[in-house]
Image: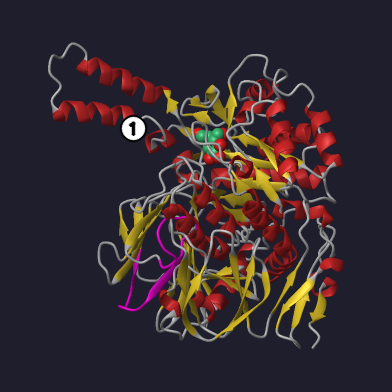
Amino acid sequence: MVTCYRFGTPIETGAVVKKCIPEKELFPHKVEGETISFTFAVEEEDQVFGLGENVRGMNKRGWTYTNYAFDNPNHQEDTHSLYGAHNFFVLAGANYVGIFVDFPGEVTFDVGYTNRKELKVTVQGTDFDVYYIEAGSILKIVKEFRGLIGTSYIPPKWGFGLGQSRWSYPTEADVLEVARQYKECDFPLDSIYLDIDYMERYKDFTVSKDNFPDLKGLAERFAKEDLHLVPIIDAGVKIEKGYDVYEEGVEKGYFCKDADGKDFVTAVWPGRTHFLDVLNSEARAWFGDFYKRLLDLGIDGFWNDMNEPSIFYTERGLKSIMDAFDEIRGKENLDLDVWFAFLGKVGAVSHNPEDHKLFYHNMDGKLVRHDKVHNLFGTYMTKAAAEAFEKYEPDKRILMYSRSSYVGMHRYSGIWMGDNKSWWSHLLMNLQMLPGLNMVGILYTGADMGGFGSDTTEDLLMRWLAVSAFTPLMRNHSSKGTRFQEPYRFAEKDAIRGLIQARYKLIPYLYSEFVKCAKRDDMMFRPLCFDFPQDRIARNVEDQLFVGESIMIAPVYTQNATGRNVYLPEPMKLIRLGVNEDLVGVDLEVGWHYLEVPLTDILVFIRSGHLLPLGKAVDRVSKLSDEDIILLGQDGCSYEYYNDDGYTKEIDLEKSMKLLTKGR
Ligand code: MIG
């Protein structure tokens, strides 16, 4: 049952598509100036799930999360904010209740941090909606919530293939070399990414003439081999005379304005930039049209970056640094207090929320200060692209994912998990982020495989491959300045090929499950206790997940481990993928099992009563064929299998599914 409450006069965020009539009476809450807070009692054994893209475990108890989109490359245990703001959680105790706070500014969730027995929500504003959902289980609550926020984005099927990325492959020659190496190693691959250097001096919708003299030709040649190029688009528009996106945007008044009504100046990659006024629908339609330039070159996938929006510096910030320098200039001795105060001022220049108070959006006639709607930027920038794709490619799905997001984003695109590091702890953290994202409908997601920042190692990449093999988005991406981590850089080529091929064999199942979860408002990645709420051991398992209806995964995420303990809440059949493939498998009973997991292997646990359809190893998604599918699991079981041409937007799930039954 959904109950909704309205505080003040909220700004329409677009998160909820199925509105309900607000109650006449509000629930108990506390007003303090411009903030409103409310609390929930949390019993000793209660659990809290959700909050989308955030650090820490699946059960969110014991920390405080500030949902205010932040370009934060430090995803650590003590981090409070990442790129997204997903204000939905489920409190699971004697009863189950789901809460969604629809507010586009800052909201803090103190989940037993200040007081272990209390969950306190603090909204930095007085105008918002709260949805209160009660049902008999976590999964039922999630389903009801997803019903409110609409159907999830479904990418083209090639978006399930492996993507190879790096910041950057700056020239055509670099891109061709990636393709060549993959081919030489016989590694499957579906896409190669273009990071900011493909542009002319970081100007959106331009292509560097020197580095990519014929992008269209390259895209065409790749298309013949079913390879896709996926360019990045940034949120900041470079201020430069003669650059048409800038000039037209100024002329039409489509950029965010400062308090004096002048185009707000900020700085990101290209130096001085303007921000598109993403909340102005005309501005959005205008910006979206520029994606067509790249569509016309044969591009059919994009990633939207820096759309928290990220700010390197503003004039205010620069001035504060200059002032800080002036303060220490000529001083003979800088003691601890002076030195750290100085460093603090310098450090505060980037991504400073004070800057968010300096610019305004024109929400179709209504002027709104940015900090009040900050969390919407990424979603609305991406909505601009999604609406353009609808217009220019009505019959074809385009690959799209964004870095920043708010609830509602899942209707337009996926997200990637941002700038993680090549750390073992991040392998686990990224696994733990999956359920929270699925809860808000974000199904198309994955982490930078191998880690974005810092240097990866061969064994970390291999273990990461064994996890990314299950995430809808599977992309190897790494930062400038770090060790190159394309799979062909490492020695164990046969083993690595086996891991990538395992992914391709899983795609028929993953794609089928993805579309089913999207259409039925279900979660693809579920903690064990979502399916087994009464199981006292399952509730504590934070490193295993159900993936779709038929399988469970229990990856290794510690270096030098040769195996791990795995908990089974029900009997399952264990099979192994990779070079030592074993599809006959072993039947395992309920309970704990210590299992050997060499670097070469991917363990898949098939649930009793379910089947896993497995495809053949191919080097492109386009080469997968239903003819090749074999069914693993118990004889006599059935599986509802969905497949399509990988592009169609007309999906009638119930009509198109085929019931596959395994013979005796
Ligand atoms: O400030 O475009 O998260 O994936 O490679 C860094 C360069 C900007 C951040 C993205 C990352 C991308 C990088 N970008």
Residue 556 in the image, given as x and y percentages of width and height: 49, 63
Mark 1: secondary structure:
loop
Residue lying at the far top of the rendered structure: 330
Residue 14 in the image, given as x and y percentages of width and height: 60, 54
Residue 29 in the image, given as x and y percentages of width and height: 34, 66
Residue under the image location 54 percent in, 24 percent down: 273
Q: Quadrant of residue 581?
A: bottom right
Which secondary structure is most common in the magenta stretch? loop
Q: How would you rate the neighbour count of disc 1 (Cα within 10 Å): few for under 14, some for 14-19, many for 20 or more?
A: some
Q: Disc 1 residue type?
A: Ala
* Numbered-mark total: 1
Going by the image, does 35 lie left or right of 95?
left
363, 482: nearer the viewer: 482
Residue 174 in the image: above or below residue 650: above
Magenta segment, which residues? 38-59
- Determine the quadrant in which ligand 1 lies: top right
